[in-house]
Image (cartoon, rainbow, N blue to C red):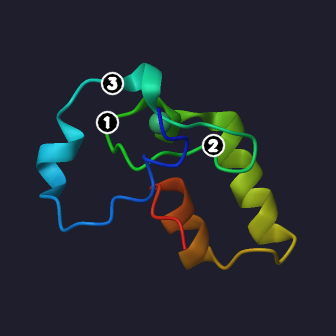
Amino acid sequence: MPTLDCRQLPAPVPVNFAYVIPMEDELEHTDLYPFCPDQTCYCHEDDEAIAAVYQAVEDGLLTPDEATDFVLGRLL
Ligand SMILES: [Zn+2]
């Protein structure tokens, strides 16, 4: 499978259509990007990953808005 497919949907695919497909095992979660765009995915509840994002805000690496987008899988 394409490794970045989760984040690089090029077409205006209806958001809800893409997200209702149960394919958790194929979503991308890495140390760098622990959050995927699937709002129903467990990764958005990952306290450890979220804490790391908050730490990045504390360190001035991310703005709070960027952190929110990051946790929600809306990568810049
Ligand atoms: Zn996920």
Q: Residue at x 45, y 20 (%)?
A: 25
Furthest residue in direction top, as rendered? 25
Q: Where residue 17 appears, x then y in whole percent? A: 12, 45
Structural distance between the alpha carbons of marks 1 and 2: 14 Å
* Residue topped by disc 3: 23
Residue at (25% x, 24% y) in the render:
22
Task: Name the disc covering residue 40, or none.
Answer: 1
Kindly tell me whether mark 2's CB lies below 8 Å from ligand 1: yes
Dot 3 falls on a residue whose secondary structure is loop
38 or 71, which is in the foreground? 38
Side of 25 where 57 appears, left or right = right
Q: Which residue is mark 2?
A: 34
Q: Which mark is residue 1?
A: none
Residue beneath the point at 75% across and 41% down: 31
Mark 3 is on which residue type?
A: Met
Q: Is residue 2 left or right of residue 41?
A: right
- Residue drawn at (76%, 49%) of the image: 52
- SS for dot 2: loop
